[in-house]
Amino acid sequence: MVKYMEVNTTPSPPRSPSQRSTLVIFVIIGVAVIAAGLAILVAYNQTAVTSTGYQGMQFSRQPDGGFVLGNPDARITVVEWADYA
């Protein structure tokens, strides 16, 4: 004996504007999450840059005891200050 299931074929009522905007927001968030996941996956699969160390790089010491790594007359300088107290 075969039983058939009755299927409702009446169309669903149209969605309200707030339901449509909620759906659009969820779709945008979903696409953003997928894009971020793919970006992270691609970033981790890239070949790691190997460091050559500090061999061959200029280094010196300032009169006040500070260290200089690289060209002391460079156009851009980075100053690091740390306090471990």
Image (tube, rainbow, N blue to C red):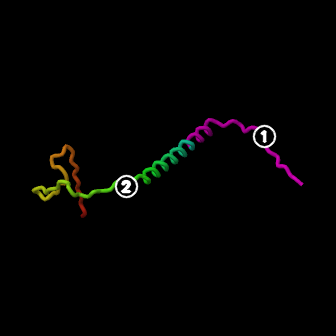
34 over 54 or under it: above or below: above
Q: Which numbered mark, 1 or 2, is in the foreground of this view?
A: 2
**Quarter of the image where one finds residue 76:** top left
Q: Quadrant of the C terminus?
A: bottom left
Give the residue drawn at x 37%, y 55%.
48
Image location (x, y in percent) of residue 4: 84, 49
Q: Is tag 1's residue or tag 2's residue first in the polypeptide sequence? A: 1
* Mark number displayed over residue 48: 2
Q: Amino acid at mark 1?
A: Thr
**Image-based side of 55 in relation to 65, left or right:** right
**Quarter of the image where one finds residue 67:** bottom left
Q: Secondary structure at mark 2?
A: loop
Q: Mark 1 Cα within 10 Å, few/some/many (few <14, many 20+)? A: few
Q: Amino acid at mark 2?
A: Ala
Give the residue drawn at x 86%, y 52%.
3
Q: Which residue is mark 1?
A: 9
Boundaries of the magenta span: 1-25
Give the residue drawn at x 42%, y 51%.
43
Q: Nearer the viewer, residue 78 or 82?
A: 78
